[in-house]
Image (cartoon, rainbow, N blue to C red):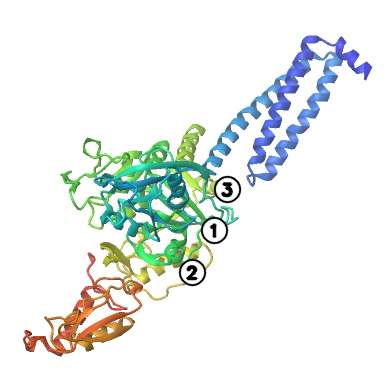
């Protein structure tokens, strides 16, 4: 050892310094590179191991060879090896930067902690005081409505009486009717509830008394599966409406955009099912009470996932929440997307004539001079334009159904542009837009596993073996369903079971949980464009939801028959003149009143009581021939058909507008 150090002392000091610096530079760079490259789990594992071994061998080689050259004074050979060693170290540094940037961005998409906000809100024209009753949700798992709500009350030492609710909408209804003086709601309550007709102007009609915020663990960041993206999987995409750039991701959010997506990496086939926001379904986290599906978002991500899974029977593997502001950044990072903008049916939006253009508020939800307007036709859209087209529904006759279709167009256009990324700078800007405006329960290694799929897509594209990814689009056939909710009328959408069944079947086949069924008998319509077929389209046989008919004035027999046809339990009570439910406008044997209000959803009804006049009113005139038994029965039948009450209807002859 003494001999070794003596030789070092006698060696050229300049080359000794170069040797030690290059060796240290290489060692540090190699260690950082190793740490970063090991983060890329499941990506070209054999190649990564071979690379690390080769450059590890070079480290040992340079350590020994450098000493030999130094002691034997072979300085020319030493300079060449120093150059190569520094070059390798520099490559390690660049690679570490790129890998670290990618991994950091991917890790940031799944947010472990979020800022949750709870507000105490009252009507703008009301005064809140110690005698005011406070409404609060009863679910102890509700972060903003219950957990932070209790902390808010404690922080401000409020001793007010607390009224507990199982439903936000009922709580807000009681606030508006002044049965309670204030309510505890999420910080983004104005955006969340303004999509409901009854609370359309809630942001202007209410004021925030107190606010409480706290950074907490992301309650939605739950792993539902250990799947990697190299096997068939499903994703629920949820649009979060926010006026801010970035996703703060409160527990409650706006559920107007819900897309269930399946992807099969083996066949490179995707399916996209956009669920119209007004679809009337059982809400899983509210004991399956029927409501518009977007209302499930008021109770958080898990409630939406459970509701979608119950509706379709498809297990949701992953969720992705994306801020609408993020769509603007993402599309701009891609350099725009090409979309064929559909011609609007109406020229007017928000009371202004736009002369054939598609015009919508901007990403800050501002109208007037801030409106974003598009000419119909195929064109390249920037971020603001793509978002405006995705949001617009007031200028199309199908309203939300057309908006769903346009959102699918934009999603498909984004997917088409992704394959054309040509530089790391563009990829980095895309990653920044995503990680800032997105939240998901996918872990980093699951996201990284998409590499093998991406490689397959690139290889297919380079070899010219067809489209990189095929997308099966869908449309859920619906019909107008004006429903009495128990507190107000709401304009919902009913859906056709056969339409949903075809969509679900296709998606399950794509997930490989069911086998495809060969259709050997079908008719060909030469006017139909089969290349752009939508699954679920034009299937309108069996309606799922049925409404309570107005049976008042019908004969007892006709009313009972209607109940039987709709599988509705009933009881009969006879009333005499002077009784509460006696009806002075109908004769004996006719329905005077019913216990369930007209247009109430039958799915929510256990039994209806039919009140039958036992005697004819003293002021009542005998029915004419037009009001006899036969005619009355026909009237009941006509009403059932008009209100779509029968349990099974054949709508093959209905018009396209219906």
Camera sees residue 26:
yes
Q: Quadrant of the C terminus?
A: bottom left
Q: Is residue 111 visible?
A: no
Could you tell me which secondary element the residue under label 2 belongs to? loop
* Mark 3 nearby-residue class (10 Å; few <14, some 14–19, many ≥20): some
Q: Which residue has dot 3 on it?
A: 443
Looking at the image, residue 106 sits to the left or right of residue 577; the answer is right
Residue 567: where, in percent of width, then height? 34, 82
Q: Residue at x 35, y 43 (%)?
A: 338
Q: x, y percentage for residue 401?
A: 30, 58
- Dot 2 crowding, Cα within 10 Å, few <14, some 14–19, many 20+: few
Q: Residues at badges 2 and 3 in contact (C-beta under 8 Å)?
A: no
The nearer-to-camera label among 1 and 2 is 1
Front one among 292 and 512: 292
| Distance of label 1 from label 2 (alpha carbons) | 15 Å
The number of numbered discs placed on residues in the rendered structure image is 3
Residue 381 vs residue 432, the one in the foreground = 432
Residue located at (6% from left, 86% from top): 621
Image mark for residue 232: 1
Q: Decide if residue 20 is on the left or right side of residue 469.
A: right
Q: Which residue is mark 2?
A: 516
- Image height of 567 relative to 259, above or below: below
Q: Earlier in the sequence, mark 1 or mark 2?
A: 1
Q: Quadrant of the N terminus?
A: top right
Question: Which of the two marks, 2 or 3, is nearer to us in this view?
Answer: 3
The quadrant where residue 601 appears:
bottom left
Q: Nearer the viewer, mark 1 or mark 3?
A: 3
């Amino acid at each position: 050892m003494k001999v070794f150090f003596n030789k070092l002392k006698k060696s050229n000091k300049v080359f000794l310094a170069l040797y030690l610096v290059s060796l240290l530079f290489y060692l540090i760079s190699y260690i950082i590179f190793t740490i970063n490259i090991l983060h890329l789990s499941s990506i070209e594992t054999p190649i990564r191991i071979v690379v690390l071994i080769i450059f590890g061998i070079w480290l040992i080689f340079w350590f020994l060879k450098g000493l030999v050259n130094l002691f034997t004074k072979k300085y020319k050979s030493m300079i060449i090896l120093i150059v190569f060693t520094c070059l390798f170290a520099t490559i390690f540094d660049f690679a570490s930067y790129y890998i670290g940037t990618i991994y950091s961005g991917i890790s940031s998409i799944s947010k472990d902690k979020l800022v949750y906000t709870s507000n105490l809100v009252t009507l703008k024209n009301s005064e809140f005081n110690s005698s005011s009753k406070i409404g609060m949700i009863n679910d102890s798992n509700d972060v903003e409505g219950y957990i932070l709500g209790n902390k808010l009350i404690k922080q401000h030492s409020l001793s007010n009486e607390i009224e507990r609710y199982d439903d936000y909408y009922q709580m807000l209804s009681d606030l508006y009717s002044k049965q309670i003086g204030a309510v505890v709601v999420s910080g983004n309550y104005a955006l969340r509830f303004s999509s409901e007709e009854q609370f359309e102007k809630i942001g202007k009609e209410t004021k925030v008394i107190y606010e409480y915020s706290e950074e907490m663990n992301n309650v939605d960041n739950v792993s539902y599966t250990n799947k990697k993206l190299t096997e068939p999987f499903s994703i629920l995409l949820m649009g979060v409406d926010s006026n801010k750039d970035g996703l703060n991701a409160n527990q409650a959010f706006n559920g107007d955009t819900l897309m269930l997506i399946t992807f099969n990496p083996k066949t490179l086939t995707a399916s996209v099912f956009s669920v119209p926001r007004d679809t009337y379904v059982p809400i899983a986290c509210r004991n399956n009470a029927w409501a518009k599906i977007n209302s499930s978002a008021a109770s958080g991500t898990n409630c939406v996932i459970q509701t979608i899974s119950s509706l379709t029977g498809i297990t949701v593997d992953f969720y992705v929440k994306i801020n609408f502001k993020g769509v603007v950044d993402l599309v701009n990072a891609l350099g725009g997307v090409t979309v064929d903008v559909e011609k609007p049916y109406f020229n007017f939006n928000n009371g202004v004539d736009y002369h054939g253009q598609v015009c919508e508020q901007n990403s800050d939800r501002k109208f007037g001079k801030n409106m974003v307007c598009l000419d119909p036709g195929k064109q390249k859209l920037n971020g603001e334009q793509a978002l405006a087209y995705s949001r617009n529904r007031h200028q199309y006759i199908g309203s939300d159904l057309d908006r769903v279709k346009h959102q699918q167009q934009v999603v498909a256009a984004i997917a088409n542009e992704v394959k054309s990324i040509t530089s790391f700078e563009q990829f980095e800007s895309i990653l920044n837009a995503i990680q800032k405006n997105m939240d998901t329960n996918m872990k980093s290694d699951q996201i990284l596993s998409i590499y093998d799929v991406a490689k397959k897509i690139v290889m297919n594209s380079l070899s010219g073996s067809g489209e990189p990814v095929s997308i099966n689009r869908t449309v859920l056939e619906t019909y107008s369903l004006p429903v009495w909710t128990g507190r107000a009328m709401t304009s919902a959408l009913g859906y056709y079971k056969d339409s949903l069944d075809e969509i679900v079947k296709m998606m399950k086949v794509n997930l490989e949980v069911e086998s495809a069924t060969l259709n050997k008998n079908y008719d060909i319509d030469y006017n139909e464009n089969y290349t752009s077929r939508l699954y679920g389209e034009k299937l309108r046989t069996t309606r799922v939801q049925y409404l309570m008919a107005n049976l008042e004035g019908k004969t007892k027999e006709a009313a009972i028959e209607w109940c039987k046809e709709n599988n509705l339990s009933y009881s009969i009570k006879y009333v005499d003149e002077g009784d509460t439910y006696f009806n002075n406008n109908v004769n004996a044997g006719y329905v005077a009143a019913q216990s369930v209000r007209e247009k109430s959803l039958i799915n929510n009804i256990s039994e209806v009581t039919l009140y039958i006049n036992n005697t004819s009113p003293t002021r009542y005139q005998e029915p004419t021939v037009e009001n006899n038994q036969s005619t009355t029965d026909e009237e009941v039948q006509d009403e059932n058909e008009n209100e779509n009450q029968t349990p099974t209807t054949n709508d093959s002859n209905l018009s396209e507008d219906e």
